[in-house]
Image (tube, helix red, strand yellow):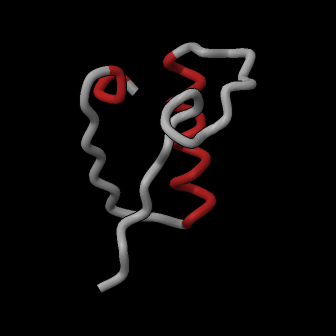
Amino acid sequence: MKPLPLLDLPGHDKSGRNRKDWKIQGFADDLIFLIKKLGLTNVILIGHSIAGNI
């Protein structure tokens, strides 16, 4: 089985902290970009805490 792609939101864990826009919409835009870039379909997202808003 192919491993599931994981997203490390900017400013969390090992991702960069040099972002200028820290709004929820910016994080959502990152997620949309990743989904499109990977050509994913039928995506199921699970988010806890702030990720639930994204």
Count of marks, rendered view: 0
| Image-quadrant location for residue 30 | top right
Residue at image position (50%, 31%) is: 12
| Image-quadrant location for residue 26 | top right
Residue 10 coordinates in the image, percent (x, y): 58, 32
Q: Quadrant of the N terminus?
A: bottom left
Residue furthest bottom as drawn = 1
Asked if residue 2 lies left or right of residue 10, the reply is left
Rendered position, 14 above or below 37: above
Residue 50 coordinates in the image, percent (x, y): 35, 21
Residue at image position (57%, 56%) is: 36
Rendered position, 8 above or below 6: above
Residue 39 coordinates in the image, percent (x, y): 54, 66
Rendered position, 12 above or below 31: above
Asked if residue 52 lies left or right of residue 8, the reply is left
Residue at image position (25%, 30%) is: 48
Q: Quadrant of the C terminus?
A: top left
Residue at image position (56%, 42%) is: 14
Asked if residue 17 lies left or right of residue 46, the reply is right
